[in-house]
Amino acid sequence: MSDIGNILNLARSKMAGDVHIVAGSPVLFRIGGELQPVTREVLDSRMAKDLTYALLTPAQVEDFERDLDIDFMYADTQKRRYRVNVAYNDGEIGAVLRLLASEPMTLDQIRMPEIVRKFAHARKGLVLITGATSEGKTTTMAAMIDEINETAKRHIVTIEDPIEYVHANKNSVVRQREVGKDTKTFGRGLRAALRQDPDVIAIGEMRDYDTIKIALTAAETGVLVMSTLHVISIDKIVERLLSYAPDSGDGHIRNLMAESLLGVIHQELMPTNDGGKRVACETLVATDAVRNVLRNKGTFHLRNAITTGQRYGMQTMKSSLDAILAEGVISEATYHRVLENYV
């Protein structure tokens, strides 16, 4: 299979999540959480390079060969979108492509609890969507943006690297800015967004102290801010944010977080019995008790707050998994694999 278009068509037909092009291996699809070979032949160096370079423009080839890796969005002939990373691996060229939906999914389609819709309709505050890599965080944020876009007349500014889902203006106006193309950095884009009369700012990822500080301040002073954060559990959120802060910034970040946080959605993307995917999530709502925990460095108490906070819309990962297992959507093996990280 030497044509990248045929490979991508096959990946779509098999409901793959990712495509791996690696010299010394068959073409691999991630299906149901596992990598599966889809070609009999093993790619040699030339085949892997040719398939990879078919995704790149001449300018991107020049950037890649200078910088040795590159991230970008790719659209095929049918306008279907892919998030692509191209890199050298032990001197060989290869790529990983993440298949994206042609348009944002809705909160109903991804089965988010009702509290997530309430977060989307808030007038101000910070909503964090957390989880490990490839757990569907960007998809959830896109669904929240779509919910606002469908139901409210608001100005939404996104700062992304790269732009994964394209939002057409509906009842709201959505301005999407890509780092490296429309703005130089997340921090610079965020500062500019604050001068653009925003109601909502969506940040692809909070990855430096400057961005975190500006985002928290914006959320505290009257803008709804949404962002993703790579953490393995809700208890680790503050530690993760503080890891970016200088030693003198610890107390400042804690206080800003306590004042501005609206809620957290922590999620796990699981393979389903029919070969699809389903999100399990736990939710934290920033009650007065939660804000006190954030101020006072006892973040291990957040787990207790979630367990006892059902009346506020909080949900534990176990209760989410229990409901999905009862539907017959996931296997018991998947249930226990995910649950063991939350007990």
Image (tube, helix red, strand yellow):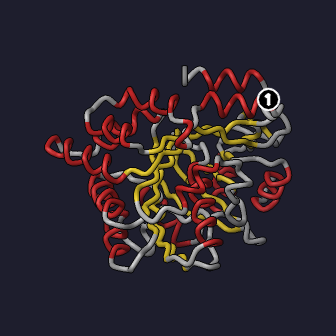
Q: Secondary structure at mark 1?
A: helix
Q: Nearer the viewer, residue 200 or 76?
A: 200
**Image quadrant of residue 241?**
top left
Q: Amino acid at mark 1?
A: Ala
Give the residue at mark 1. 326
Q: Kindly give the residue lying farthest to the front in the view shown.
A: 311
**In percent of the image, x 79 and y 43: which residue is there?**
276
Instruction: Name the spot of residue 273 as percent of width and height, x first.
Output: 83, 34
Q: Is residue 198 left or right of residue 146?
A: left
Q: Is residue 252 left or right of residue 193?
A: left
**In percent of the image, x 76 and y 72: which residue is there?**
77
| Screen quadrant of the C terminus | top right
Q: Is residue 66 left or right of residue 6?
A: left
Q: Kindly give the residue lying farthest to the left in the view shown.
A: 248
Q: Nearer the viewer, residue 2 or 233?
A: 233
Residue 68 seen in render: no
**In percent of the image, x 49 and y 61: which residue is there?**
122
Instruction: Name the spot of residue 136 as percent of width and height, x first.
Output: 61, 47
Q: Decide: few, some or many residues near mark 1? Use Cα within 10 Å; few <14, some 14-19, many ≥20.
A: few
Q: Is residue 31 above or below residue 167?
A: above
**Image quadrant of residue 336?**
top right
Q: Nearer the viewer, residue 201 or 255?
A: 255
Instruction: Name the spot of residue 244 as percent of width and height, x first.
Output: 28, 45
